[in-house]
Image (cartoon, helix red, strand yellow):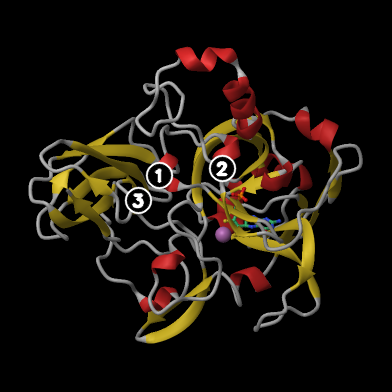
Amino acid sequence: MTEPLDRRQFLGSSAVAALPLAADGQPGDPSGPAPFPGLIVREFEPVNLEMPFATLDQARTPTERFFVRCHFAQPALHARNWQLKVEGVVERPFSLGYEELLRLPMATKTVTLECAGNSRVFLTPRARGVAWQLGAVGNAEWTGVPLATLLDRAGVKPGAVEVVLEGADAGAVNDDPKSPGPIHFARSVPLAVARDGVLLAHAMNGAPLPQAHGFPLRAVVPGWYGMASVKWLTRVVVTDRPFQGFWQTFDYSYFERENGVPALRPITEMQVKAAVARPGQDEVVPAGRPYRVFGAAWAGTAAVSKVEVSADGGQTWAEARLQGEAAPFAWRLWEHEWSPRQPGKAVLMARATDSRGRTQPMQRDPDRRMYMISQVLPVVVVVR
Ligand SMILES: Nc1nc2c(c(=O)[nH]1)N[C@H]1C(S)=C(S)[C@@H](COP(=O)(O)O)O[C@H]1N2
Ligand SMILES: [Mo]
């Protein structure tokens, strides 16, 4: 973030002459990592920012590289007067302030959040919505209070089925289908999910949540697409019937077929998916030298157990080397040494398989509408 200033100061210093030149002729340390170039602006207002996925270099996504997805202007909430209401089908509705929240027992979890629209730019014909490439996904360490703690304190009544998470941000959706005037961003999860796993996070990667990621408090729903991880949380409502809010019916829904009849369902769990960080589309790679193909893979509530790479458009596959441990909710980095021989175009692909044996489809399923883009994506490179 301070890179331009540092660079100017750096270039102005007399030590520059003594420094080695990097391959591109710029002064710098050729053995050091490339500086982070910043996030890609997909939309300016409301702000939607994408991580340039080629900059992936560690399992934990640094906060300043983590994508930002906002449907409305970011609310500026202050810890001093922020309150979380817990209400609905409960014995003892209550409100909680920030100080009190921080005194509750905490848990920390590493969780990958992927926007349900990530990779949308690869859909043909072009689909409406933010045109994300690969970087509307990140893996962070979230610290906060289990939602179960607050539900227990409120005393969930018998007959409760879901928990609605509501954010402080609001606005009118004017594209069809329009919202009924201004509405908040809100999303429900089944009571069982709310009780077992949902974290109300006040810290990200060991520091208080930045405003863009939901200060002072956000939900983190492990294994689900990002839309359920409601930011700027101000209300938790326990309901005795399924919630049919805008953000899980008109938006963030897909078709599921029962007995051949398609019906709309809210989007929930992330699909198994591997994404290639390098090489990128149309990258020129040298012939006759090993190239390290690498990326990340995730599988929702399951763990990634295998990643395969193809360098011939999907005819033959080789197993990639997985880093770290197999774990639910968090991605794993993977790498594969590829030695391209023939100059010309080559089509690379990566395919993940999870601990339940599910793997990525080769073809797009149109029932998923403009969401859950997890089919195997080709990366065309030029071997030279
Ligand atoms: N209040 C609120 N919460 C929200 C959203 C929003 O617009 N408003 N966007 C959701 C979507 S679609 C995604 S993918 C994630 C993204 O979280 P991030 O911006 O921290 O990456 O936040 C979710 N939570
Ligand atoms: Mo999203």
**What amino acid is labelled 3 in the image?**
Ala
**What amino acid is labelled 2 in the image?**
Gly
Q: Which residue in the structure is indicated by mark 2?
A: 38
Report the front residue among 27 and 83.
Answer: 27
- Quarter of the image holding residue 59? top left
Report the front residue among 320 and 125.
Answer: 125
Quadrant holding the N terminus: top right
- Quarter of the image holding residue 141? top right
Q: How far is the residue under mark 3 from the one under mark 1?
A: 10 Å
Compared with 232, 3 (above or below) is above
- The tag earlier along the polypeptide, 3 or 1, is 1
Instruction: Answer left or right for 159 relative to 353.
Output: right
Residue at image position (69%, 39%) is: 149
- The tag earlier along the polypeptide, 3 or 2, is 2
Crowding at dot 3, Cα within 10 Å, few <14 / some 14-19 / many 20+, comes out as: many
Instruction: Answer left or right for 365 relative to 215.
Output: left
Q: Quadrant of ligand 1?
A: bottom right
**What amino acid is labelled 1 in the image?**
Ala
Circles 3 and 1 in contact, beta carbons < 8 Å: no
Q: Which residue in the structure is indicated by mark 1?
A: 54
Q: Which residue in the structure is indicated by mark 3?
A: 275
* Callout 3: CB less than 8 Å from ligand 1: no
Report the front residue among 237 and 250.
Answer: 250
Q: How far is the residue under mark 3 from the one under mark 2?
A: 20 Å
What count of labels does the image hold?
A: 3
